[in-house]
Amino acid sequence: MRIWIPLIAAATASAAPAVAQTQAELDRFAELSALYQSATIVGEPSVEPCILSQGAQAHCMKITVVAAPSDHITGPYCPLNINDTAEDGGTWFVDGEVRDVDGDFIANLAEIYQDDAWHMFDPETGDIYVRNNEIGCIVAGDPTNETGQPDNICVDCSLGFIGKTVTRTYFIPLSPVPTDGQKGDVHGGIGVALNGVKVEGPAPLELILGEHTLGPFDDCGGHINPSEGYHYHGIQEDCGARADAALSGHAARLGVALDGYDLYDQHDLDGTEPADLDACRGHMTEGLGYHYHVEAAGTNEILPCLTAQTGCSLDDPDASCNASIGGGRPAGPPPRND
């Protein structure tokens, strides 16, 4: 097994951590480095100084990954005709449930949303109005529809049409730092799955639907835009890398949150959800410490909040992390989590 040696970047006066690394932090770094072996890593993980969302100085694991799943294919998203089956399309969230985006779903959008303005297919041929390839990725990056595209379109962006390899750089605190009482905002991102995919905050469903467009997810609860690459808005327990929990019968570990606590599947191995989850869907158990259990995929809310101060999710692999910039959200450009 390959374990990386921590590399400490030269600290600036504004980013220097208050204390040196502890053995617990070095152990945590080695653990996380091993867990992310299945992701497509760019360079090597390192230990870096970071400033967390409420100004705490800390040490973070810095890891840059290709923003695409290393262990499952992506898509499909939009069916092409109203006679297409579920195998030809993706999924969408309706009233807290995951629905197949097949031809019948598209044909019945007006009934599903009680809005006669929906008409996303040619009534003569049954062909669905789809924007894909390069233009699909442009539209996917602009849920406000300011691209000048008409409404009543199904948006389909594939990784091959973005025109570049999209990467994300994460700074994950090696020792979680409590907040001052205000829970962490998830709209800038929740964390990173073990296969390198960003675990995103809620998709702006009302904004997308208000333009009479759809940007379907695939069967794993993810889709693509040019700024974030592939990212999850819902966690499906049969998709993506998992690590067994160090506690018999417990849910599997699927990733790490931006505040440094681990993310686990919604259900324990007996199919039940823990009964003592707090407002952020976290709890403390002997042997695992504090950790989160994600919400059901159809809710469009993988986690409602984060308990500790957050690190960063950035599109610049050379940037440093100051997550206190921008109202407590991770530093970098305004989040676009459509």
Image: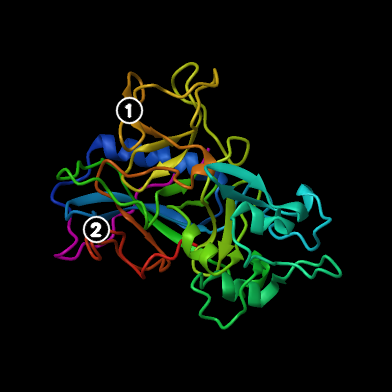
Q: Residues within 10 Å of mark 2 (few under 14, many from 20)?
A: some
Write down the residue under mark 2: 328
Circle 1 residue: 283
Please state which of residues 6 and 136 is positioned toward the viewer in this rendering: 136
Above or below for 278 versus 201: above
**N-term-proximal mark, 1 vs 2:** 1
Residue type at numbered disc 1: His
Task: Indicate the position of residue 161 as horizontal and vertical percent values.
Answer: 66, 72
| Magenta span | 1-16
x and y percent of residue 96 in the render? 52, 42
Element on which disc 1 rests: strand
Residue type indicated by callout 2: Gly
Magenta stretch encompasses residue 263: no
Residue 290 shows in the view? no
The percent coordinates of residue 74 (x first, y second) are 67, 54
- Residue 131 position by quadrant: bottom right
